[in-house]
Amino acid sequence: MYKFLWFLSVCLFASVLMLSAILFAAFEENPRISRQVILTPKHVERAKQIIDVHRYQVRPGMTAVARVQSEDADLAANYLANRFVKGSAQVTLANHSAHVLLSIPTPWNPLGGYLNLEATLIETAGIPQPQSVHIGDLALPDLIIDMVMPQVILWLRQTPSYRIGLDALQKIKISQSELNIIYQWKGDFTQEMRASIISEQERERLFFYHSLLTKNSLQRGVEATVSLAEILPPLLRSAAERSETGDALEENRAVILVVTFYTLGSSLKSITPKAATWPIPVKRTVTVSGRDDFAKHFMVSATIAAYVDTALSDVVGLYKEVEDSRIGSGFSFNDIAADHAGTRFGEKAVASIDSAQELQRRVASGLKDSDLIPRLSDLPEHMPEAEFKRRFGGIGTPAYQQMIEKIDQRVSILGVLH
């Protein structure tokens, strides 16, 4: 009996030592990859082209190919790593394989400040399979990878949005220059995806603010337009009341999303099918400083910032202006100013509990149009691409940056941000 207990103690001690060694090998003091996320209008344009091909050319039952350039695959991986785990990532494509490097900060961990993962994804008849997986200095045996991967796929299939994507995916071909994602579009994909995007709690918030906005719209007169400065205060006043026992950040997000869809003249049923049965508000043109395009720029940017992040919001607005300079109304620094103001509004709405509640109090006390967007009368607008390049040399030049700095200075002193 004594020998058995001694043997058991030795095994337990050895197991603790082995586990400690594994943990020390897994976590490291420094990241193996550290990169900023740099988005440009060209990146947005390429993403839009991929979406447009699917939207206008692919029909239910068709097999289609989404082609993603190597640069965009790398950018998307780094953006997602930064967005969801505050880390950095790098994807390098080769023929039939991809090398992935991911660094995740772990400031809470006394064993090391970063979890560094490295793997090679090998092209197969379906989903690429990981090989040569390393966590820090620890190499995972292929046997463990082969056991874990089916469980990961099974876990993903339990979420409708992932399950639908996995069911549609047929094969990913990898070359040095691009990913070819081969998928079969199914007719019920959009409906099921929309149903899975919004949780029941989020849907309740949206319904509450949509109903309040509808009630307010019915109480107004017969005027055809309404100022954004009149729509926001009663909704954020209610958000402040609900935040006393709820989540101020989520209340603000719901208000912003509801107002954005109303401003665009769109129905929330595009993201939550149940909204098709909700009360219908009186349709009016929503304006800021007398213009509906400013209200749309402001609210769309606010939504992107509140639900995603500031960098993406800014670059989407900039892409819109570049497109307008080519085929639309022309490049307008006025619209850029409305974009930046909306971005800062959305950012403040969800930056922290204190920031969210401060915005609620500020807006609930009443707004003027000048609280939402800065003075715009002296900013150039409606410039065709040739004129824009002649006057400012293009995006990123000193003259362009000077205008952006002027806009941001004006945005920073807006009443709604204080």
Image: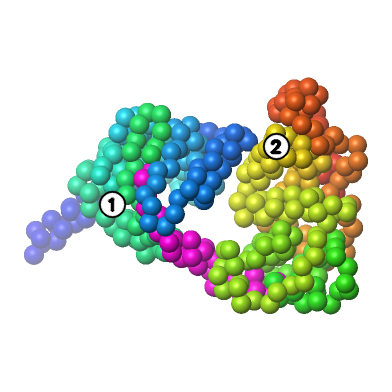
Looking at the picture, tell me which residue is in the foreground, 391 or 58.
Answer: 58
Relative to 365, residue 111 above or below:
above
Q: Residues within 10 Å of mark 1 (few under 14, many from 20)?
A: few
- Residue in the picture at 83% in, 37% down: 381
Residue sitting at x 79%, y 46%: 338
Determine if the magenta segment contains residue 178: no
Q: CA distance from mark 2 to mark 1?
A: 48 Å
Answer yes or no: is residue 271 visible: yes
Residue 10, horizontal then vertical, whole percent: 18, 52
| Residue 327, label in figure | 2
Q: Earlier in the sequence, mark 2 or mark 1?
A: 1
Q: Nearer the viewer, mark 2 or mark 1?
A: 2
**Residue 228: quarter of image:** bottom right
Badge 1 amino acid: Met
Disc 2: CA contacts within 10 A as few (<14), some (14-19) or many (>=20): few
* Closest to the observer, 217 or 157: 217
176 left or right, relative to 354: left
**Residue at point 85%, 41% (across, down):** 410
Give the residues drawn in magenta, as a range: 181-209
From the viewer's perspective, tell me whether residue 351 is left or right of residue 93. right
Residue pointed to by mark 1: 149
Q: Secondary structure at mark 2?
A: helix
x and y percent of residue 284 in the render? 80, 65
Q: Is residue 131 left or right of residue 101?
A: left
Q: Is residue 218 above or below residue 152?
A: below
Secondary structure beneath dot 1 equals helix
Q: Answer yes or no: is residue 79 visible.
A: no
Q: What amino acid type should be assigned to the residue bearing mark 2?
A: Ile
Provide the major secondary structure of the magenta segment. Answer: helix
In the image, residue 97 sits, relative to residue 209, either above or below, namely: above
